[in-house]
């Protein structure tokens, strides 16, 4: 973060802001709001993220949500910057504490020399001068109550703080006010009026004078095209729609639910439908019904729900039904850590079924990529007629990023093909891709197909012939091998050869990329690749691996009985290469850059 | 291919027959299939619009024996799959078939939900009081005392009452018939198909191998009595008072509570909006709001709200 252009000041002895009075220019700033979820701290973060999108700043957010409905301690962290912002930040530069518990639990996340603003109505006066931290007590609650007039109690605290931040960082007030008007105006005049009273009161509060300086958070270079700001689940939802999904079914489970909720309201606008089923088995079955009917269909869930869908997914592989399945991973097993992040469903996604049931598994790396991965999933499902599982996760689901508005000019509406199926209609040709005859399509020869989960011949007739089972098994496997051959290897970032190659997948992309830059500055040569296609894997990784002393797979899952995470296990099994090792953890939190860097250094020094 | 001037070809039993059924000789399910063909011949539904869907079991092999678009799915989940077909394809006639294990045990919860949602489709249960395909285990309708491979000394669990389950679940048409009564079966099927909404016909269909004779007491040819429900004619006569009001849920429960083998016919029939209609209303209202916009424009609006 900070005064200089780098985003890392943790090693400099000075505090992040120097000591000069006046205005300090900032390239990046990590601000953590710590309070209770019912205080609407997410709202502050969401407004700041949106503003960043409108001001050519990069942004990434991170939040924790209590798993109980009645609320509880929660944080929202925003990383704003004019350079590339790859992670939500290991530590914060600014901390806003609404309560004593917020202060006690989060002061450690503040950098040396950082600034801690606390609500002096709830937090005991802080006199100590620890680690050069500047403590600023502001009666947030009482000032808000005073501003609004008391009737709404402390409801507007979040907006008060937003005003405070706007002033402290010299953010564009007009832009922010228009965002507030747009968002809160919908909730009625009273709500908006109170919010503006709170905002103005925060904006007028002389926080800069108290700290003795103000900050100017630089805007970046204007990007071409418009920026949109949203979270991963929303981006995924819209990607599915862009990919042609018009029908789907699901059952609520955190953190998947917001995708199904959005599809439920959005799809009717496109003439489609999303159904809340009685359970996950019903949901996947209904989605297969939609797909069989000739539509691009989806179902989705989080870990435990994906397990429930497994039998039907085996059917979809056997009957060669195109089906997109979204799995928003969370901490497991069982109910586990429902509102925390993990990448522990990879094996389940690839292998979790009875019999040998090959399917496609892909994973997005950031919020923007959720959109494009969803589109790719739809295309792959149509082309290869099998389940395509998209592995996103809790961290991606809820964090907010800004990205360029997608080009919608090539979007095509899905069409039902109910044309007559000609003579010699073979749904499962041994030498070609699957064909479909949805109900409603006349069959020229007068013979109608029954789609089955029994092993079958090329015409789909049940067949127990041992040779046919082998050939059909080959066929279902070879489809995916064809796909593997068509995939390109991921790009290498950082050094193209040297000490360490980091391999990642999914939401760990940002921290891994940031680790590369940090390690490079310490005389270790390091490169990184990030895998989107997890099953099948593209061919040819051995050529990349050969250029490094260590191949280190960074994952948010357990190291297992044999010391390898889930992707590492797959790569070791495919390449039989003992230099493939693992960095794993399951604390339910995203990777801190420091955690990866320390492990890399340990691996390099121990060899 | 037919052109516009051609007389549409009549759909016959021959067109509709597919593989010869693999059921054991004498299995009640043969008669169910025959009755189904006859009703389709009578109703003349366009061939390509017929869709037959089933789970797993002897009875669930039904789609293989009908030459129509069909799905042989997994055990117990035919109804949610059929719901997907029905909800997304209003042009089709959707039929689901299955047994007592498939429908009332492993798929029991799906049945309740398809019923309460009043999905527009017709479901035929071939109830033989036993698991046929897996060779004689206790089923959810096996009577207490039935000796099966999983209850060698006789079933001890109380069987479910399918008619009560169906009425309670919210099925908007509930009929009961017997595989030895082809005419009655046809009447039930025809009424079920014409009923808009979730219509179910429970057929007592004998498994001659694992539970022979169980339905004889409702078969006059075997010395039993096939007692029909007399439905109200609304003719203001004294006799009519005693007749059954199919729209009355309580009377349906009373019929369902009769001592086995009970009565046959329509237990319940209600005029209730289907999920298909209700969802379509929402779709229409949503479409009206977006006006003439293309999908890309609707999506672009959504992105605009995120700027
Ligand atoms: C998930 C699963 N569990 C169990 C089975 C085995 N199975 C197949 S059919 C069946 C019971 C069939 O009984 P019913 O539905 O009454 O049909 P019937 O054969 O009597 O017509 C069972 C237990 C299966 N195919 N799949
Ligand atoms: S086992 Fe019973 S139910 Fe199955 S086909 Fe034979 S007679 Fe019919
Ligand atoms: Mg049975």
Image: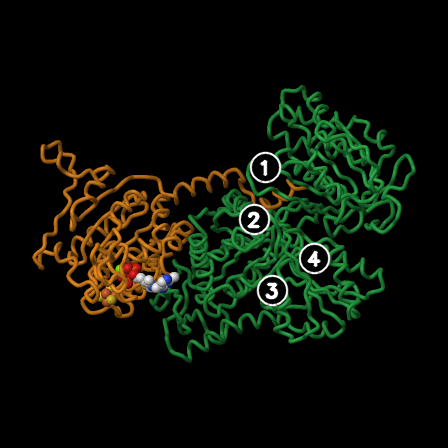
Compare marks 4 and 2 and give the one earlier in the sequence.
Answer: 2
Q: Nearer the viewer, mark 1 or mark 3?
A: 3
Chain letter of disc 3? Answer: A
**Quarter residue B215 falls in:** bottom left
Mark 1 belongs to chain: A
Output the letter for the chain in orange: B
Check the residue under mark 4 and report the chain it is in.
A
Question: Label 4 crowding class (10 Å Cα cut-off): few <14, some 14-19, many 20+?
Answer: many
Q: Are marks 1 and 3 on the same chain?
A: yes
From the viewer's side, name the closer residue of B39 and A351: A351
Structural crowding at the residue carrying mark 3, measured as other residues with C-alpha within 10 Å and reported as few (<14), some (14–19) or many (≥20): few
Foreground disc of the pair 1, 4: 1
Q: Is residue A467 above or below residue A147?
A: below
SS at mark 4 in the image: helix
Sequence-wise, the earlier of marks 4 and 3 is: 4
> In percent of the image, x 72 and y 29: which residue is there?
A160
The hue of chain A in the figure is green
Q: What number is the disc on residue A71?
A: 1
Mark 2 vs mark 3: in front: 3
Q: Which residue is mark 4?
A: A509
Real-space CA distance between mark 4 and mark 3, rounded to the nearest whole angstrom: 22 Å
Element marked by disc 1: loop
Tag 2 near tag 3, CB within 8 Å: no
Q: Position of residue B92 (x, y in %)?
A: 36, 53
Q: Measure the alpha-carbon separation of dots 1 and 2.
A: 15 Å
Give coordinates of residue A481: x percent, y percent: 57, 72
Estimate how packed mark 1 is, as few (under 14), some (14 to 19) or many (20 or more) residues with alpha carbons within 10 Å.
few
Q: Is residue A55 visible?
A: yes
């Amino acid at each position: 973060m900070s005064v200089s252009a780098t985003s890392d000041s943790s090693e400099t002895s000075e505090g992040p802001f120097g000591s000069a009075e006046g205005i300090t220019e900032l390239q990046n700033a990590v601000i953590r709001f710590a309070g209770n979820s019912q205080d609407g701290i997410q709202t502050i973060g969401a407004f700041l993220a949106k503003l960043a999108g409108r001001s050519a700043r990069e942004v990434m957010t991170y939040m924790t949500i209590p798993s109980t409905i009645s609320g509880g301690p929660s944080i929202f962290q925003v990383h704003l910057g004019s350079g590339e912002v790859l992670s939500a930040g290991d530590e914060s530069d600014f901390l806003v504490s609404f309560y004593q518990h917020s202060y006690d639990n989060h002061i450690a996340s503040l950098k040396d020399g950082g600034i801690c603003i606390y609500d002096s109505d709830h937090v005991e006066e802080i006199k100590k001068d620890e680690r050069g931290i500047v403590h600023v007590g502001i009666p947030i609650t009482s000032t808000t109550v005073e501003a609004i007039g008391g009737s709404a109690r402390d409801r507007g605290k979040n907006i008060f703080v937003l005003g405070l931040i706007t002033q402290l960082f010299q953010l564009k007030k007009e832009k922010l006010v228009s965002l507030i008007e747009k968002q809160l105006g919908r909730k009625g005049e009273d709500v908006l009026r109170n919010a503006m009273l709170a905002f103005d009161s925060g904006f007028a509060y002389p926080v800069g004078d108290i700290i003795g300086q103000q900050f100017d958070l630089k805007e970046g270079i204007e990007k071409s095209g418009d920026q949109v700001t949203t979270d991963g689940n929303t981006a995924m939802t819209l990607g599915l729609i862009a990919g042609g999904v018009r029908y789907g079914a699901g059952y609520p489970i955190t953190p998947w639910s917001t995708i199904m909720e959005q599809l439920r309201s959005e799809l009717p606008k496109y003439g489609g439908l999303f159904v809340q089923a009685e359970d996950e088995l019903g949901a996947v079955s209904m989605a297969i019904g939609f797909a069989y009917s000739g539509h691009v269909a989806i179902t989705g869930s989080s870990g435990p729900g994906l397990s429930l869908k497994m039998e039907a997914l085996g059917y979809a592989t056997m009957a060669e039904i195109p089906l997109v399945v979204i799995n928003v991973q969370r901490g497991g097993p069982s109910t586990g850590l429902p509102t925390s992040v993990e990448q522990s469903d990879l094996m389940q996604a690839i292998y979790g079924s009875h019999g040998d049931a090959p399917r496609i598994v892909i994973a997005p790396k950031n919020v923007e990529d959720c959109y494009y991965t969803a589109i790719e999933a739809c295309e792959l499902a149509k082309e290869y007629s099998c389940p395509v599982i998209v592995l996103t996760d809790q961290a991606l689901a809820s964090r907010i990023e800004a990205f360029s508005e997608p080009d919608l000019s090539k979007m095509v509406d899905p069409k039902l093909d109910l044309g007559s199926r000609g003579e010699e209609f073979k749904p499962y040709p041994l030498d070609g891709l699957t064909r479909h005859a949805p109900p409603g399509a006349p069959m020229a020869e007068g013979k109608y197909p029954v789609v089955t989960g029994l092993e079958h011949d090329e015409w789909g007739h049940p067949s127990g012939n041992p040779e046919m089972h082998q050939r059909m098994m080959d066929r279902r496997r070879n489809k995916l091998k064809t796909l593997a051959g068509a995939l390109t290897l991921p790009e290498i970032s950082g050094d193209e050869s040297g000490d360490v190659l980091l391999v990642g997948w999914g939401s760990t992309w940002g921290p891994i990329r940031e680790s590369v830059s940090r390690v490079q500055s310490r005389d270790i040569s390091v490169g990184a690749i990030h895998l989107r296609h997890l099953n099948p894997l593209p061919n040819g990784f051995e050529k990349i691996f050969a250029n490094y002393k260590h191949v280190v797979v960074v994952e948010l899952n357990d190291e297992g009985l044999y010391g390898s995470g889930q992707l590492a296990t797959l790569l070791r099994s495919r390449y039989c290469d003992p230099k493939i090792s693992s960095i794993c953890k399951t604390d339910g939190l995203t990777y801190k850059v420091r955690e990866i860097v320390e492990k890399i250094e340990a691996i390099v020094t121990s060899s | 291919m037919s052109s516009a001037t051609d007389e549409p070809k009549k759909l016959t039993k021959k067109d509709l027959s597919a593989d010869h059924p693999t059921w054991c000789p004498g299995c009640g399910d043969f008669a169910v299939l025959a009755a189904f063909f006859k009703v389709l011949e009578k109703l003349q539904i366009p061939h390509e619009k017929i869709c037959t869907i089933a789970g797993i079991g002897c009875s669930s092999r039904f789609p293989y024996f009908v030459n129509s678009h069909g799905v042989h799915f997994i055990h117990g989940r035919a109804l949610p799959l059929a719901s997907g077909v029905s909800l997304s394809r209003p042009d089709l006639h959707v039929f689901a078939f299955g047994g007592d294990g498939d429908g009332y045990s492993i798929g029991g919860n799906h049945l309740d939900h398809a019923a309460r949602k009043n999905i527009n489709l017709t479901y035929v249960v071939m109830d033989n009081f036993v698991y046929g395909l897996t060779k004689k285990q206790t089923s959810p309708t096996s009577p207490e005392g039935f000796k099966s491979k999983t209850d060698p000394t006789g079933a001890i669990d109380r069987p479910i009452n399918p008619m009560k389950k169906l009425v309670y679940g919210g099925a908007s048409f509930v009929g009961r018939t017997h595989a030895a009564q082809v005419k009655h079966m046809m009447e039930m099927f025809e009424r079920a198909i014409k009923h808009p909404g979730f219509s179910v016909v429970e057929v007592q269909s004998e498994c001659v191998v694992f539970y022979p004779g169980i339905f004889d007491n409702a078969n006059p040819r075997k010395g039993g009595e096939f007692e029909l429900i007399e439905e109200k004619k609304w003719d203001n006569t004294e006799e009519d008072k005693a007749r059954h009001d199919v729209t009355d849920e309580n009377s349906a429960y009373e019929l369902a509570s009769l001592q086995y083998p009970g009565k046959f016919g329509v237990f319940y029939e209600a005029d209730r909006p289907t999920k298909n209609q209700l969802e379509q209303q929402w779709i229409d209202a949503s479409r009206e709001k977006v006006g003439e916009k293309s999908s890309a424009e609707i999506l672009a609006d959504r992105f605009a709200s995120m700027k």
